[in-house]
């Protein structure tokens, strides 16, 4: 019996062990996953496949700026990793039912919370809820919420905006192909990296054409905004800064007050350096502006991008700071840094055929404080720089006379564009009027232009000194743009601390003293707002130079004539079997000629606009003088109504069978543009006199007009007939257009009776068109 029990025990022991092992395994499987806890702005907890945020009570109600950037994109979608696509101000709020809400704040109307009107603002400016979360548990003075589904779902507030999905024809998000890649958290920001896949029924992209789906990588940054916003600096139209604003309501006002303020970095002296700054000593800021260079940037160009950043240091010295802005290479071996981390400003290098670069910034909408910037630098901007420089400086810089520039020249071109784009990220707008303050003759004066530069601002679109002639012997110091007088003034105005100012109003009052000390009598500090040029001020243009567009353009044409003859030599490459180099650079020269024509065209009609404060006397708008307008028309007589046959070199038959179309299209296009001005002329040069002058130029050869002249005459009549058909009876120029057509009806009938058969047929055709237009239908 004992033996049997012993045997039974021996048999049972393995079975018990198996049952225990199974129970232990079940305990392990059912046990809560080990938590991965990461400390930072939000404590981030990863448990299995779920992600949690732990939000301290101290951050409830605090404002955060969220920015969403691509980390990767499908091919040929026009967007690239590093580019921003979305931005919101958000805040956490506890609801009455115990949930944690995430709201987006739309800063449109505001009032101080101590004012009675604040109640009205609150109920009529309800901010949208973009997320609602069950509080999983309270951990001390913090709430833990699960954010997995929030980030995995398609949320246009923080993800891809609706307009962009429409652009790519993306429909529903594919849930199991969209997921959280990682979440990192830092003291002042939390970074959420996502992979998102959408279905698409139509093939707008190569990816959707071949698979029906498109996958994007996104990074959402949550940046804690300052509890106390930086003091705003009011916008001033005399200095070109980007601006933000909102409507401010208060109990004691009798009309709503709009607040408009500039965007700028927070540059402050250390407390112990304030007295030094007062004495005029340069001091280092508490926190300098630092830009890193994307490690994807080819090594040979990095030093030039950095130089373009550091070139702004001398401008900040005018504001009282030294070492205020610094360019650095990205520390590639530092695993704690990420280019998607919103604490870092970066020049991102994008592998794209796009010929461009642009410099946006991310700022606090409450104050205008710039928090970071990602300048986007497209690889193929070098092609644009090459073509600009060959066309505008090829006749005065031998190094520009080839299809591949040496490294130093291309590097200096990159440096100039780097400085321009960095200027935008500092808050500066384009100053399209800067170059108009320079006398054209000074652009050919070697000593003067090398000392002062061909434009007072690198924020102008002045490019290169195309006025200089080969015999002037001007070096690159007088050809390239540079950070110059206006730029230094703008940085001083925007960044110099007004020590002693207690609020925006006192800051503005102290700044006005600085303005009155510097602006009067110094035209090189003038800001010409070409981007909102509502009155056609001829001084505010892109790609132009000097104070006289006619003289500058005709100097430019002299250089184009030299270059067009030299193009076969400059563009030769025995591997270029399709003549792409020659054809491409010919087109660039032709486009440059077209720009010159447009520069001159802007001198007809229009008004000069000179901003004045309420305390300054004189007119803000004054009409462009008649002599200047007539001089512009004389330019067109020489360069358009006389066929520009210099645009027809012998080698054109290598890339077109109809070279005459290249001049005809420019001529007819300019005739149409000249006639499009007739309703917008100023009192100095009225429509009747202007039309009479244009008619004289167009029909100056009626005995035996060339094919080119016939084309211009046809366009002239077609444009007038079109105007008459669409213009109402109250249109300013309609009476003079009618008179002109009536006169031309008589004259073309006469011309049709003389000359050769081709001439007779041409004028008979015009007469028929005019007769039909004047016949009552």
Image: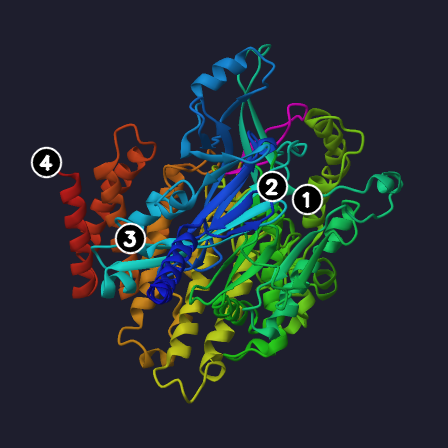
Find disc 2 in the rendering and name its residue.
Answer: 241
Badge 3 crowding class, 10 Å Cα cut-off, few under 14, some 14 to 19, many 20 or more, is some
From the top left corner, tell me how far across and down residue 507 is, in percent: 72, 29
Tag 4 secondary structure: loop
Between disc 3 and disc 2, whose residue precedes?
3
From the top left corner, tell me how far across and down residue 658 is, in percent: 27, 73
Which quadrant of the figure has residue 754? bottom left
- Span colored in magenta: 607-622
Between disc 4 and disc 1, whose residue precedes?
1
Q: Marks 1 and 3, Cα distance to the nearest angstrom?
A: 49 Å
Q: Are marks 2 and 1 in contact (CB under 8 Å)?
A: yes
* Disc number placed over residue 174 in the picture, else none: 3
Q: In this rendering, which labeled residue sits more in front, label 1 or label 3? A: 3
Find disc 4 in the rendering and name its residue.
Answer: 777
Find disc 1 in the rendering and name its residue.
Answer: 490
Q: Marks 3 and 2, Cα distance to the nearest angstrom?
A: 43 Å
Badge 1 crowding class, 10 Å Cα cut-off, few under 14, some 14 to 19, many 20 or more, is many
């Amino acid at each position: 019996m004992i033996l049997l029990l012993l045997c039974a025990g021996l048999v049972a022991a393995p079975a018990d062990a198996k049952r225990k092992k199974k129970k232990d395994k079940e305990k392990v499987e059912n046990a809560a996953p080990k938590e991965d806890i990461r400390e930072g702005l939000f404590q981030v907890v990863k448990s299995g496949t779920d992600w949690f945020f732990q939000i301290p009570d101290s951050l409830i109600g605090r404002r955060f700026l969220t920015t969403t950037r691509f980390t990767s994109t499908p091919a040929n979608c026009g967007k690239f990793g590093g580019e921003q696509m979305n931005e919101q101000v958000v805040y956490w709020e506890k609801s009455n039912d115990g949930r944690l809400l995430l709201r987006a704040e739309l800063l449109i109307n505001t009032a101080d919370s101590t004012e009675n009107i604040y109640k009205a603002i609150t109920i009529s400016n309800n901010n949208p809820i973009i997320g609602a979360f069950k509080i999983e548990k309270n951990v001390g003075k913090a709430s833990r919420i699960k954010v997995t589904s929030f980030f995995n779902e398609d949320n246009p507030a923080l993800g891809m905006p609706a307009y962009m999905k429409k652009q790519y024809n993306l429909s529903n998000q594919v849930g199991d192909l969209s997921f959280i890649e990682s979440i990192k958290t830092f003291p002042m920001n939390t970074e959420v990296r996502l992979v998102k896949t959408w279905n698409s029924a139509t093939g707008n992209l190569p990816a959707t054409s071949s698979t029906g789906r498109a996958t994007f990588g996104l990074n959402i940054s949550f940046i804690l905004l300052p509890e106390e916003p930086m003091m705003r600096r009011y916008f001033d139209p005399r200095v070109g800064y980007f601006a933000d604003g909102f409507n401010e309501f208060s109990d004691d006002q009798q009309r709503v007050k709009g607040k408009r303020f500039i965007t700028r970095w927070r540059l402050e002296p250390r407390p112990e350096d304030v007295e030094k700054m007062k004495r005029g000593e340069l001091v280092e800021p508490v926190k300098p502006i630092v830009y890193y260079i994307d490690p994807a940037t080819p090594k040979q160009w990095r030093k030039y991008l950095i130089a373009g950043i550091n070139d702004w240091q001398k401008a900040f010295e005018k504001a009282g700071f030294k070492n205020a802005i610094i360019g650095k290479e990205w520390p590639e071996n530092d695993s704690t840094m990420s280019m998607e981390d919103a604490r870092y400003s970066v020049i991102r290098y994008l592998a794209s055929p796009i010929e461009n670069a642009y410099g946006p910034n991310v700022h606090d909408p409450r104050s205008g404080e710039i928090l970071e910037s990602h300048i986007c630098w497209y690889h193929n901007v070098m092609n644009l720089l090459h073509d600009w420089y060959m066309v505008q400086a090829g006749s005065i810089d031998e190094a520009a006379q080839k299809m591949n520039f040496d490294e130093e020249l291309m590097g200096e071109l990159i440096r100039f564009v780097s400085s321009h784009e960095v200027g935008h990220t500092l808050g500066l707008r384009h100053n399209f009027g800067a170059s108009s303050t320079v006398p054209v003759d000074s652009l050919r004066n070697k000593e003067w232009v090398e000392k002062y530069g061909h434009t007072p601002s690198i924020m102008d679109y002045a490019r290169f000194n195309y006025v200089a002639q080969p015999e002037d012997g001007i070096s690159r110091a007088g050809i390239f743009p540079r950070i110059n007088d206006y730029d230094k003034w703008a940085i001083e105005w925007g960044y110099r601390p007004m020590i002693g100012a207690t609020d925006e109003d006192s800051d503005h009052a102290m700044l006005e003293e600085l303005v009155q000390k510097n602006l009067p009598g110094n035209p090189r500090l003038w800001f010409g707002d070409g981007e909102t040029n509502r009155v056609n001020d001829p001084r505010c243009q892109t790609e132009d130079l000097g104070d006289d567009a006619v003289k500058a353009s005709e100097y430019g044409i002299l250089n184009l004539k030299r270059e067009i003859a030299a193009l076969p030599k400059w563009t030769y490459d025995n591997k270029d079997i399709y003549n792409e180099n020659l054809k491409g650079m010919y087109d660039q020269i032709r486009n440059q000629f077209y720009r010159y024509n447009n520069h001159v065209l802007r001198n007809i009609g229009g008004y000069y606009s000179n901003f004045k404060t309420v305390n300054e006397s004189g007119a803000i708008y004054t009409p462009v003088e008649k002599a200047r307008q007539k001089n512009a028309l004389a330019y067109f007589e020489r360069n358009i109504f006389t066929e520009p046959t210099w645009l027809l070199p012998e080698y054109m038959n290598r890339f077109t069978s109809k070279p005459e179309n290249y001049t005809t299209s420019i001529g007819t296009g300019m005739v149409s543009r000249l006639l499009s001005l007739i309703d917008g002329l100023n009192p100095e040069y009225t429509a009747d006199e202007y039309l009479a002058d244009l008619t004289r130029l167009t029909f100056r050869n009626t005995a035996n007009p060339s094919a080119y002249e016939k084309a211009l005459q046809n366009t002239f009549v077609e444009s007038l007939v079109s105007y008459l058909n669409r213009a109402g009876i109250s249109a300013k120029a309609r009476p003079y257009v009618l008179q002109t057509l009536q006169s031309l009806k008589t004259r073309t009938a006469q011309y049709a009776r003389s000359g050769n058969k081709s001439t007779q047929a041409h004028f008979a055709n015009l007469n028929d068109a005019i007769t039909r237009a004047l016949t009552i239908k």
